[in-house]
Amino acid sequence: MELGLYSFAENTPDPLSGGHLQSPAERLRDLIEEIELADQLGLAFYGLGEHHRPDYVASSPVTILAAAAARTKSIRLSTAVTVLSSEDPVRVYQQFSTLDLISNGRAEIMAGRGSFIESFPLFGLDLDDYDDLFEEKLEMLLELRKGGKVTWAGSKHTNAIPGIAVYPEPVQKPLPLWIAVGGTPNSVVRAAYYGLPLMIAIIGGRPRQFMPLVDLYRQTGAKVGHDASLMKVGISGHGFIAEDSQDARDVAFPAHNATMSRIGAERGWPPGTRAQFDASTTSEGAYYMGSPQEVIDKILLQHEWFKHDRFGLQLSVGTLPHAKIMKAIELYGTVVKPAIDKALGA
């Protein structure tokens, strides 16, 4: 199994540092250091989410990943996610092809509809077109990914391309493209129909309940004739690692709860509680918060359920001290990864 990290490049007041709020430049410097350490420890990938809100600093993830590419050697550089609905597929292809050249073949696109809607009014899009935008732009991106001269008839939300090659050409042909979903069956079926790898974000509830979605994905892919070896599944979720399990939870809770409660208030959810948080850190819960061994056990338990190929850990949902994040990455790379590799015969 490939183990990696992902981040939304959050920039919120740090409860453990007296509510200190970094400048965007400081947050990005820390982020690049985190990616660099993940590379040095042999982690497989780093994903960076696109957001257009004041509490995140990655409205242009490919720019940040290009900076990281210059300071890393082997880690794959992905988004988590590219909000394809509000992007121009031609520019997406060009940006990731350029990242692929800079990184010598380490770029990946992870496309999704996104968990926030700020990009729709920002780019003059109608939320009533939410599904159609993604579907049409995904089809166009898949056509662009084939390379060579592109003939695209156009659609309601995309412009026609009359047999024109799009440059630059990437190192990887085709560029790797994952579809990220939050649990919607239609999104799972779409990924299976196109034979694209699937990343499922599990950020609450009981992960075991997602097993039918994984089965749906694999069964649909088989029905439409895709090679089973191409039908890769990834699982991602929130977590934090420290030497001591109680310390991990105590460190992570204040920032995590503040962030989730703030987002929840926007969506009509009640504020979170410590009891709810702790319940989600148990073996059957969604969060990977604890000692290295607890995280190892949870990853392996879920592998029994999903037989997934990739696992992505989001270490900081709200801002935590940089030193603690770096220590968590160290434990992930030096303790968790070797144990998973050994257990799964990597």
Image (spheres, rainbow, N blue to C red):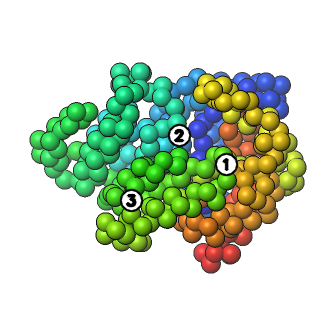
* Neighbour tally class for label 3: few under 14, some 14-19, many 20 plus, Cα within 10 Å: many
Q: Which mark is residue 222?
A: none
Q: Mark 3, mark 1: which one is toward the viewer?
A: 1
Front position in the image: 4 or 94:
4
Q: CA distance from mark 3 to mark 2?
A: 23 Å
Q: Amino acid at mark 3?
A: Ala
- Say whether residue 337 is visible: no
- Say whether residue 311 is visible: yes
Image location (x, y in percent) of residue 242: 81, 52
- The reply to whether discs 3 and 1 touch (Cβ–Cβ < 8 Å) is no
Residue picked out by circle 2? 49
Task: Determine whether 184 is above or below 262 in the image.
Answer: below
Picture quadrant of residue 9: top right
Residue picked out by circle 1? 205
* Neighbour tally class for label 1: few under 14, some 14-19, many 20 plus, Cα within 10 Å: some
The kind of secondary structure element at disc 2 is loop
Which residue does the image show at 58% across and 65% down from the upper left?
A: 306
Using residue 91 as the reference point, say whether residue 154 is left or right of it: left
The kind of secondary structure element at disc 3 is helix
Q: Mark 2, mark 1: which one is toward the viewer?
A: 1
Mark found first going from the N terminus, 2 or 1: 2
Q: CA distance from mark 3 to mark 1?
A: 24 Å
Residue picked out by circle 3? 192
Using residue 183 as the reference point, say whether residue 294 is left or right of it: right
Q: Amino acid at mark 2?
A: Gly
